[in-house]
Image (cartoon, grey):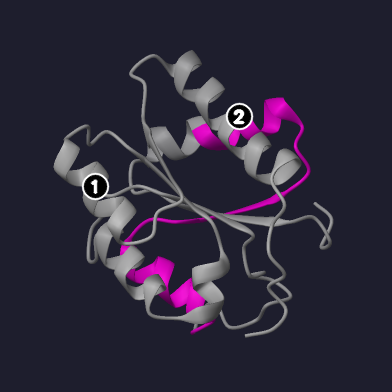
């Protein structure tokens, strides 16, 4: 993939769901670099540029984060809370993509700064279509903020 393609950070601990996201984006031919981490602690380290994610030539600052809520080590809510306290990561849109359907979770995610809240469909084809549509919106329709300055 091209270094100039926008980076998307996928924060997903379920290998099957991560596979479906990757597959959906490959099929959609949306030019991007997908980086995958499997827990909330890694997501925070990635966004902060901390080791082992410090080299931004390899681990580009993402223009979009796809975030599950139920994660090991630190939850998606922890990631949202961390992001809300920092200017640069706060500019990066976060799409929560989770199986949590409770109104309390939806409200809490938005209160912590989520930009979108999507419930994962059970059917793989529907899951892939939802992923494709969400990423296409954020990367092809929406105007993203500049991330080069804090």
Q: x%, y% of residue 106?
A: 26, 43
Disc 2 crowd, CA 10 A, few/some/many (<14, 14-19, 20+)? many
Q: Is residue 23 magenta?
A: yes
Q: Which region of the structure is painted magenta?
A: 21-50
Q: Is residue 37 magenta?
A: yes
| Front one among 58 and 122 | 122
Side of 104 relative to 47 (left or right): left
Q: Nearer the viewer, mark 1 or mark 2?
A: 1
**Relative vertical location of residue 136 with respect to residue 84 in this rendering, above or below:** above
Disc 1 crowd, CA 10 A, few/some/many (<14, 14-19, 20+)? few
- The residue under the point 33% across, 18% down is 122
Which secondary structure, mark 1?
Answer: helix
- The residue under the point 69% across, 71% down is 58
| Front one among 106 and 19 | 106
| Front one among 114 and 130 | 114
Side of 67 relative to 89 (left or right): left
First in sequence, mark 1 or 2: give its number.
Answer: 1
Which residue bears the numbered disc 1?
A: 107
Total tally of numbered discs in the picture: 2
Q: x%, y% of residue 74?
A: 24, 66
Side of 59 relative to 45 (left or right): right
Which residue bears the numbered disc 2?
A: 132
């Amino acid at each position: 993939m091209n270094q100039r393609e926008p980076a998307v950070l996928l924060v997903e601990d379920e290998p099957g769901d991560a596979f479906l996201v990757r597959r959906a984006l490959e099929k959609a031919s949306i030019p991007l670099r997908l980086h995958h981490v499997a827990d909330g602690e890694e997501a925070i380290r990635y966004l902060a540029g901390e080791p082992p994610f410090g080299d931004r030539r390899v681990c580009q600052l993402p223009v979009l984060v796809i975030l599950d809520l139920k994660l090991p080590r630190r939850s998606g809510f922890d990631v949202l809370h961390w992001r809300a306290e920092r200017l640069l990561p706060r500019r990066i849109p976060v799409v929560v993509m989770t199986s949590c359907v409770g109104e309390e979770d939806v409200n809490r995610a938005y209160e912590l700064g989520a930009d979108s809240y999507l419930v994962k469909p059970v059917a793989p084809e529907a899951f892939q279509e939802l992923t494709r549509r969400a990423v296409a919106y954020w990367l092809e329709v929406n105007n993203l903020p500049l991330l080069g300055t804090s």
